[in-house]
Image (cartoon, grey):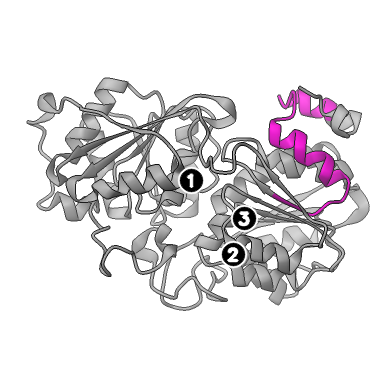
Amino acid sequence: MKTFSEIGIKPELEAFLKKINFLNPTEVQEVAIPKVLAGKDLIVRSKTGTGKTGAFLIPIINRLQRNDGLRAIIIVPTRELALQVTGVADKLCRNFGMHVVTVYGGASINVQVDQIRRGVNVVVGTPGRILDLIERGALKLNGIKYLVLDEADIMLDMGFIDDVDAIISNMPEDKQTMLFSATIPKEILDIARRHMKQDREKITIGQEEDLTVSSITHRYAITSPNTKFHTLLAYIDKYDPKKAIIFANTKNAADRIHEMLKSQGLNSILLHGGLTQAKRERSLGIFRADARFLIATNIASRGLDIPSISDIINFDAPDMSSTYVHRVGRSARMGKEGRAFTIITNSQRRLIDEIKYEANINIERIALDTEKFKDIKVSFRNPERNFGNDRFRREKGGGYHDRRHDQDRSGYHKGGYGGRNRENSHGTHRSGQGSYRH
């Protein structure tokens, strides 16, 4: 294993990395950092939890100078990821007298404008808010030297690619571009062809076909819609997860699971797009500190880095293998072991085969003893509807109407995420069709 100095990092930055417990580069960092320092455009495919954030932040900070002004912009799909990347970037920059500004919908745009005007070296933000700031004349990208597209496949799924194209059109051609993604679909390669130099390099960490880290154990159980909650309790009883994210497909489902777990005396926190940004940040803070369960929609599947998560539980099975990959990637971070458990109904059996094939994993069916929980009343007249578990008996014969349904579905409307329909200064999309806040 190499040291950071052996791959080109300055001694003073390496010393600070050790202080914040970045002792040695991960595999993706060891391969990518020298190429970034050499000025190469990169397409990096690496599974979640492998240290991708450090792979671009460390070499960028290594090359920045305090008096340069704005030289780096990092575009991410969600505000949670923006805040997370900023947390790392701010530690590194502050130690060397540089400044990071985070920009995203759901927060005051005027505050963000003031922060930029006071001086900034690195901007981390979501596409819609970045475009708003450009249009207001508050964010000028003519001096950008480093562009990072982080979690590019998620930006594609959420319909932000047109916004990304518009942002890049405001940058100089001679910038260095880095694209990081857990998967590299054709559309991502199209972005690379449009915006990267001809001599760009592709880095693949792990086997090309492996989408999840090998230290995750995958299991599932089949149950009826009326006994899904009992199956959840049986899993908790048998496997005793230390810290788990429980995924639901809708905000209503997440609310109800949260209520039911609380009724059983289980320490749980709620996270979905129906909460204000302040409440979402508070939920994540409490979960990181001491809560055992986080009940969440897919907003928690995108880029959250909480190293201690032992279990990912899909109360509602994801209807796309890529969603499964991003969800389970919240566990087994940085080489640790993790478990993934999915509850399905008989009508969803084919989903397991799809996930097995497309995510290239072995997933074991398990039997759980729900007998001891049979007297617990699920306090909903129609648990299947309220828990949203069979929404993938989809309207159009097996395919949900648009790949971008990964959002909280109550905030999604067909067409509401494409092109330049993006959040306004309050974080909501301008199309008037949707209220999802990213």
Answer whether labels 2 and 1 touch (C-beta < 8 Å).
Answer: no
Question: Which residue is under mark 2?
Answer: 187
In the image: residue 201, left or right of residue 393: right
The amino acid at mark 2 is Glu
Kindly report which numbered mark, 2 or 1, lies closer to the viewer in this rendering: 2
The span picked out in magenta is 14-43
Answer whether labels 3 and 2 touch (C-beta < 8 Å).
Answer: no
**Quick one: SS at disc 1?**
helix
Quick one: label 3 or label 2, which is nearer the N terminus?
3
Question: Which residue is under mark 1?
Answer: 326
Question: Which residue is under mark 3?
Answer: 76
Q: Residue furthest left?
A: 375
The residue drawn where x is 20% and y is 27% is 368
The residue drawn where x is 12% and y is 53% is 382
Q: CA distance from mark 2 to mark 1?
A: 18 Å
> Up-down: is 161 above or below 312?
below
Quick one: label 3 or label 1, which is nearer the N terminus?
3
In the image: residue 89, left or right of residue 306: right
**Quick one: SS at disc 3?**
loop
The residue drawn where x is 48% and y is 40% is 284
Was residue 40 drawn as part of the magenta stretch in this picture? yes
Is residue 296 in view from this perspective?
Answer: no
